[in-house]
Amino acid sequence: MGLAKRKAAYVEYAQAVPLKYAIDADSCIFLQKGKCGACQKICPTGAVDFKQKPSTETLNVGAVILAPGFTPFDPGRFDNYQYANLPNVVTSMEFERLLSASGPTAGHVTRQSKDHGEPKKIAWFQCVGSRDQNKCDNSYCSSVCCMYAIKEAVIAKEHAGDGLECTIFYMDMRTHGKDFERFYNSAKEKGVRFVRSRVHTIDPTPDESLNVRYVGDDGQAITETFDLIVLSVGLQTNPAVVDLAKQLDVDLTASRFCATDTFAPVATSRPGIFVCGAFQGPKDIPQSVVDASAAAEAAGEILTPARNTLTKVPEKVAELNVNGERPRIGVFVCRCGINIAGVVDVPSVAEFAATLPYVEYATDNLYACSQDTQDALAQTIKEKKLNRVVVAACTPKTHEPLFQETLIAAGLNKYLFEMANIRNHDSWVHKNNPELATKKAKDLVHSAVKKVALANPLTEAELNIAQSALVVGGGISGMAAALSLSRQGYPTHIVEQEAQLGGQARNIYQTAKGEAVAEKLQELVRSVEQDGNITVHLKTKLDQVEGFVGSFKSTLAGNKGQTVIEHGVAVLATGGKALTPTEYGYGKDPRIMTSLELDRKFMANDPVLDTAECAVFIQCVGSRQPDRPYCSRVCCTHSVDSALQLKKRRPEMNVYILYRDIRTYGERELLYKKAREAGVIFIRYALDHKPTVSITGSKVTVQVTDHVLGLPVAIDADLLTLATAVLPNRDERLANFFKVPMNEDGFFVERHAKLGPSEFATDGVFLCGLAHYPKPIDESIAQGKAAASRAITLLARKKIFTSGQVASVDPMVCSSCGVCVSVCPYSAPSFIDASARMHAGKAQINAVLCKGCGLCVASCRSGAIHLKGFDNDQIFAQVAAINWD
Amino acid sequence: MSEWEPKIVSFLCNWCSYGAADLAGVSRMEYPPNVRVVRIPCTGRMSPKFALAALREGADAVWVSG
């Protein structure tokens, strides 16, 4: 990014995958001038090849997925912000690097001017290169910048302390993602200042600070000085990607994103080519991950007949029985080139290892992970009849699976293995202390040797995955999931409590892109009903669920009594509903209605739509307030779209939208712009000054304080629409059935907010749609496909092996106290049935459900539970091996 | 200030702190070499017995992180 210098041989960034060096051809003296070549001479493995040239390869594929991402907007051309001239004006991307522990300042934020001083006042400017048609051509909202600016401000304050003043200048604060509004509120509590203003100009001061001129909410011009300014740059499609789209004959939107249909959110205009991520529209990580799974699913549908036709099956080596044998340990100490050997005296560590009890063989090698060393390792295991292996190298988190594969190939159980982390935890962090680093390496190797000596071969439970699925909820998202599962060949049951499919989509008139929902919904319902692989159970509820991943047994209770179905996976798509408001005179006058009730009028072509003189929308009814502190995400776009429909039917109608922040994220912003152009009047109100509604005689009057005039305004409304909050269909019983968590708002909690948005931490259970968080139709369908995609990765394996590192109970010692049963987050322990012949009433642990966390082991007051692979004696031995002298 | 440096045994959760210690290495941060890491599958695995064992075996301090 140009913030710091780097060498011509470089690693892109610390978390790069693969974590390998590359050569910057533009800066390499050898490639430019034919001199030097030092890296080639010094590289011990001969990995540097200057002769590599770009090559063209041809692949035969059945589907293509486009995930080219975005390019940050370049603010260099904005003369009023002078990004190109002023060192203390940086982009948000550059600021991310300044905050990063692996960045040029190691996470310590400094000014970019020569003083490198610590900033005391930092300002963020939102919407740089977004929502702007005057200075650039990006009239859409980039969706992610509000949230990342708040995050950067909070992290900067956490790092620099409360003395740092952070101010965010914004137009509308758009924290419409799950738990984002809470983060926004907590940022305010932490002292981040939010100023609603678009800054006009930045003027430098003699000490390279920055004077900022802006107009406050009251219309007064204010000048304030900041030490550092961060431009929250927007997302845009790279021109090279625009060319690629042309070449591929894929349609783009006016904003140069990939054009998609609401009901096929990851399909491009060209069959067989799919899209995900920010090329489909500016979006954040969770939505990109949802899209990615959905695109994989869409590609999977057309590739189903070809599945497993190109798969290679590895040869299986029979496992040697080493039970009862005396440990014969091999220790392999890795130099990792100079990464370890440059600091740690590797030969002396290997010599030391050879002296330890049970060690039969110890050696060092250049790269333990290279293929030739792996082959040699397997050979040595056989030759020396080793039955335990220690590799002293890098971290087990990345390399343990690789070495375990080698053990398996040599016929050893993969749990007879231990790693000593002498790189990440030693040579890399103690480079100025080689002597103590070597001593530490010996300790770590000694610990690993003592631990592995006590290791036993472990077995992994094999589990067949029933090749069928259950989808709970027959709304848009549930149907999308069911169709995906069925089209990839898995029989699927849909359980729907209502008498018909469709869920909330039945109440919606049209999408933000203008597609009629009823028509598309009918098509979707028809494809579900005609799908021979899908069984629909209407007016049915779940009565009981037994089992776990791969073999669930669910009892359905419907009109015709009970049915039991067996399924390998479950998708929870239980949807949501609109809040029934208790304020703004709702229920007291037929002219006051919810957004969905207005949609019904559109669908029914109600004559009032053509006669009304004045329509008012009130936003955030029940959302973003202390008792429901989340944004319902869909209501701004919905009201703006409805307002436009009214204007279209009757241009002379006065239409007002009373809002707090307009959150028409992404290309939905274009609708907002269109609404303003059509004459819809937007009046902002504050949470502590909500509008009031009075019904007197024949009039419904809305009173609100106009944010521009600062004066109260009274509007007589013929149509008053309340944009009500989206509520989840909170179902504690269902959550208990599948052992999945719910947050305090009643939405399900996914495995990981960013990286696992469509699955639960509980194996074999997935989620999608409004049950996860409020979202529009396109995102609901994408998540339905994503949940199916995640489920199919499990189903396609047909059987799975669980980890061998699980807890087990010694029933002779168990006192039946039940602590393990109550503490386990995964419901793995249970009591053996009272009528059992053996050990009745004692605890037992289901190895399939156990995640091996060891919570029950530490909690067991009788010492009856052991954690295989991390047993007490192993950890004691590790601790005892440390030589503190 | 004395020259004394405590000897520390740290019990780190495999999923977070152990990974963070890895990242400290990747980022080439430096810290004193008198700490020995014991990887545990989760801090739920931590038992007071382990802390006592570490102190008994000569450590001055025990650090549990997860």
Image (cartoon, helix red, strand yellow):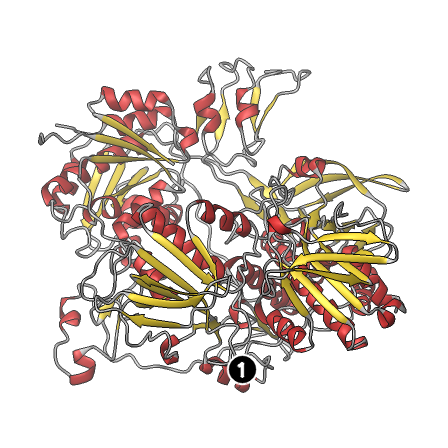
Q: Is residue A535 visible?
A: yes
Secondary structure beneath label 1: helix
Image position of A283 with respect to A856: above or below: below
The residue identified by callout 1 is A245
Tell me the quarter of the image containing the N terminus of chain A: bottom left
Q: Residues within 10 Å of mark 1 (few under 14, many from 20)?
A: some
With respect to residue A34, does A163 lie above or below? above
Relative to A771, is A4 on the left or the right?
left
Q: Is residue A492 above or below residue A291?
A: above
* Residue A734 falls left or right of residue A593: left
Residue A714: x percent and y percent? 73, 60
Who's the residue at 81% across and 66% down the image? Answer: A518
Pick the front one: A726 or A488: A726
- State which quadrant residue A250 falls in: bottom right
- Residue at 27% x, 30% y: name it: A450
Quarter residue A29 falls in? bottom left
Question: Is the C terminus of chain A in the top left, top right, bottom left or bottom right quadrant?
Answer: top left
Is residue A559 toward the left or the right of residue A712 in the image?
Answer: right
Left or right, residue A194 beside residue B1: right
Q: Nearer the viewer, residue A294 or A442?
A: A294
Q: Which chain letter goes with mark 1? A: A
Residue A620 x, y percent position in the rendering? 66, 54
In this rendered view, identify the residue nearer to me: A325 or A354.
Answer: A354
The residue most toward the front is A711
Percent position (x, y) of residue A275?
57, 71
Q: Amino acid at mark 1?
A: Ala
Residue A763 position, x and y percent, is 58, 43
Q: Is residue A591 visible?
A: no
Residue A545 vs A860, above or below: the answer is below
Report the number of discs: 1
Residue at image location 81% in from the left, 76% down from the top: A649
